[in-house]
Image (cartoon, rainbow, N blue to C red):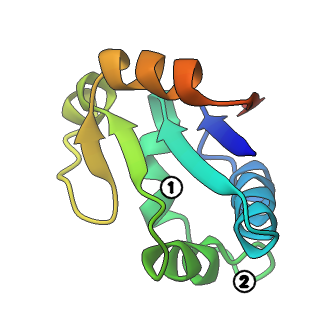
Amino acid sequence: MRLAIILNTNDHETAWNALRLGAAAIDAGHKVSVFLLGSGVEIDSIKDEQFNVGVLLQRFAGTKTSLLGCGTCMQIRRREAGAITKSSLADLIRIIEDSDKVVTFG
């Protein structure tokens, strides 16, 4: 299955759960795409001991899964590409078209 996860928040627990779902899907052999919108592009700056998003981001770094971020949202928040690849809504449309299931958080 091809799963698209769209995250539109920087809420610690919500981001953690979105990434946990993605990691579990990858572990089960599924292809996962993650697209970050709005404050979701701030996911790499979340610091929380209980909801350790950083550990999950490291798990994604070791896979073929990219964390794509809305370029406009990144620009508004003065975020540079790094762990998050600057992307566009055209890419989000392609991800949605290519996915069997789409899940949104936020």
Q: CA distance from mark 1 to mark 2?
A: 14 Å
Residue at x-position 55% and y-position 46%: 33
Residue at x-position 37% and y-position 39%: 69
Q: Which mark is residue 15?
A: none
Which type of secondary structure does the marked residue at label 1 adopt?
A: helix
Quarter of the image that includes the C terminus: top right
What amino acid is labelled 2 in the image? Glu
Horizontal and vertical percent for residue 92? 44, 23
Horizontal and vertical percent for residue 73? 33, 27
Q: Which residue is mark 2?
A: 49
Answer with left or right where residue 55 lies relative to residue 23: left
Crowd around label 2: few <14 · some 14–19 · many ≥20 (10 Å): few
What amino acid is labelled 1 in the image? Ile
Q: Identify the mark nearer the N-term, 1 or 2.
A: 1
Horizontal and vertical percent for residue 84? 33, 55
Give whichever of 94, 57 is nearer the camera.
94
Instruction: Say how many tags the image has.
Output: 2
Quarter of the image that includes the N terminus: top right
Q: Mark 2 and mark 1 in contact (Cβ < 8 Å)?
A: no
The quadrant in which residue 90 appears is top left
Answer with left or right where residue 66 lies relative to residue 84: right
Q: Which residue is mark 1?
A: 43
Which type of secondary structure does the marked residue at label 2 adopt?
A: loop
Give whichever of 30, 106 is nearer the camera.
30
